[in-house]
Image: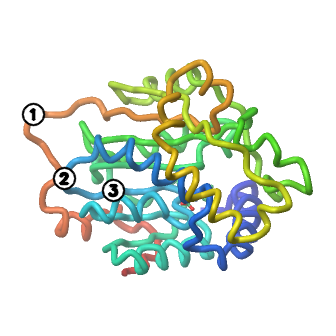
Amino acid sequence: MEPDPVAQAGQGSWARYWAARSGHSGERDIWWALDRTKFEWLRRQLPPEGICLEVGCGSARLSTLVGTEGLRAVGLDYCAEAAALAQTSFARAGVRGDVVMGEALRLPFRDDSVDIVLSTGLLEHFEDPAPIVHEMVRVLRPGGLFYSDVVPKKFSLMCVLDGIGKGQHDHDGIPEYAFKGPQLLTMLRRLGLEAVRVVSSGVFPPRLPILGRIRAVREAQGLFCYGTRRLWSALDGTALAEWLGVYYLCVGRKTGASPGKSGSQTASRVDNLRRPKAPVAVLKD
Ligand SMILES: C[S@@+](CC[C@H](N)C(=O)[O-])C[C@H]1O[C@@H](n2cnc3c(N)ncnc32)[C@H](O)[C@@H]1O
């Protein structure tokens, strides 16, 4: 297959993005607090076992948390720098996880093969994320859990000061598109999910410009946000969160579940995930 020049341009930007962040791995900043807050919301919906695939996993922060619950984490990214960070995240947390290098638009996995499919901070980078969601739903087993948090281009309290002092929102040519909740809801239902919920969320205090370049300050803010997370989460789904929140939490189930089918025998299924002849490199833990 011919390499897709648009995808390759994106890959270069993501490679630079991750190369610049490799030293930050493990930092307890505001993103650390957000991940834990999201995870507390997601955890209530997780099955006790099964395979969880994160598409566009980056450093796999959310998958790592899912892995600590005993689920088998698989992260996929098309960027080698991200794959290396994901592997480090799994190893540091003592999580059994696999990292696969591959393209989200052509997932190298069989139909109906995973129990949970998730993405975090991925879909907003595509003008039309439907082809990626279509792939995510394809590999999900009927009745399996779909989760995505979408961080669209919009006003948010957390980023309100980012423009001062050069800002912390430099995306180095990585596009970010505007989405509204109802638009996401319609897309997810159209692509084969039921019981879909899209919740406006992520109201957090502003990140600090200039001072935020100091690690200790970033960590103090991360710990503060984490300590007060229940206060902020109480606003989820309200008009205030729609206006001030930084992301949408989206969940749904793949249609067509047959009663009694669950994610059992995870270990043997993980070896059989790949589509025959799929050209992928798997980095084992
Ligand atoms: C915002 S990052 C996700 C961050 C991640 N949630 C974390 O915990 O670090 C989006 C990721 O998606 C990956 N990505 C973007 N487009 C992709 C594609 N078409 N196929 C595979 N990965 C892709 C990028 O390389 C990047 O690592």
Disc number lying in front (1 or 3): 3
Instruction: Give the quarter of the image for residue 64.
Output: bottom left
Q: Would residue 257 appear left or right of 238 to someone viewing this image?
A: left
**Residue at image point 74% right, 54% down:** 6
Residue furthest to the left in view is: 260
Quarter of the image where the N terminus is located: bottom right
Q: Secondary structure at mark 3?
A: strand
Q: Nearer the viewer, residue 11 or 225?
A: 225
Query: What amino acid type should be assigned to the residue bearing mark 1?
Result: Pro
Quadrant for ligand 1?
bottom right
Q: N-terminal of the two: label 1 or label 2?
A: 2
Which numbered marker is on residue 259? 1
**Residue at image point 33% right, 73% down:** 95
Q: Would residue 19 appear left or right of 61 to someone viewing this image?
A: right
Which numbered marker is on residue 52? 3
Which numbered marker is on residue 48? 2
Dot 2, how many residues are within 10 Å of its Cα: few (below 14), some (14-19), or many (20+)?
few
List x then y, in percent, for residue 275: 35, 61
